[in-house]
Amino acid sequence: MKEKLTIGEMAKLRGVTTEALRHYDRIDLFKPQFVDPHSGYRYYSIFQYEILGTIKELRQLRMTTDEIKEYLNERNFSKSLDSLKNKHEELVSKLKELNELEESIREKIIYLERAEKENDLQRVVFREMKSRQLITLNEKINNNFELCYGVLNLENMLSEKTPILASNRLGIIIEEMNLKLERFEEPSTIFIVAKNKEDIPNTFQMTIPEGLFACIRYNGELLTSRSESLRTLLHHLDLNNYQIIGDALQIMHLDITITDKSNEITFEIQVPVRKL
């Protein structure tokens, strides 16, 4: 055993690379304690092992160089505890964000794998759906230009950090009266289905009750290609004695975040109905 250690010996002792030690030396974070006056060789002291171990631990906590320098400067119990508490809060916040992102991606994969199998277009199907809470700016869009700004404004209202596209949550509202009067090209209100409880004024929220929905999927544009599908759906409802009982939702089923092939972009129209 000896007090003076070469850079290789100290690196091996603490499980770091010699290049890391040279880097710490260059940035004045952790410098050798001894310099041989004759050879100029630099040596670490065995008593420095604790400092290097602390640096290694703080790096694992994702502390920056400046944060580590501040931590090591005139250490005391209170200061060290406060530093660790602050870093812990940062890590918990990042972990929460990563967990939300992982959940979002997992849900997207499940949704897209299901969508891959459900590729029937222009076919009316009936589905029971749970209640949904919508967030909307109550502004009608007339074209894709207004749609882009509408999506951005809605995303900025949400507390969640995960993207909403390709999630079966973004769409527009087709008013019941426009459906019944077959005014299919009228401007529509954009919305997002809320995923979490959001602290948003009630004026920007809308509840879609649970119930039976007649659904049809089509390929094309959001606003200008839905007329044929709506006529098909309304004709099917008339033939089978169903009544429309509320506003319809037009959901972005597969959008441009998933594909740039126009024949793969699809939408689903969901109309609340009841049997006469």
Image: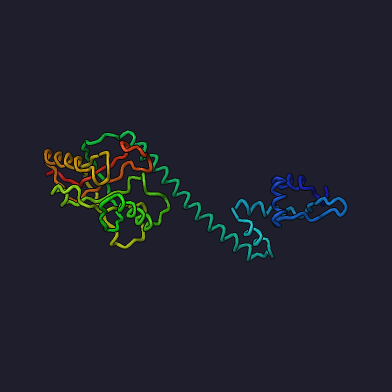
Between residue 175 and residue 274, name the one nearer to us: 175
- For the C terminus, the image quarter is top left
Residue 9 seen in render: yes
Q: Quadrant of residue 200?
A: bottom left
Residue 23 in percent (x, y) is at 69, 51
Q: Is residue 27 left or right of residue 222?
A: right
Tell me where residue 39 appears, x and y as whole percent: 86, 50
Residue drawn at 12 percent across, 41 percent down: 238
The answer to whether one can see residue 133 in this image is no
Which residue occupies 74% across, 46% down? Answer: 13
Q: Going by the image, does 258 lie left or right of 204?
A: right
Q: Give the number of callouts.
A: 0
With respect to residue 6, does 260 lie above or below?
Answer: above
As rendered, which of 96 and 188 lies closer to the eye? 188
Q: Give me the residue at 80% from left, 51% from top.
A: 43
Where is residue 189 drawn, in percent x and y? Answer: 25, 54
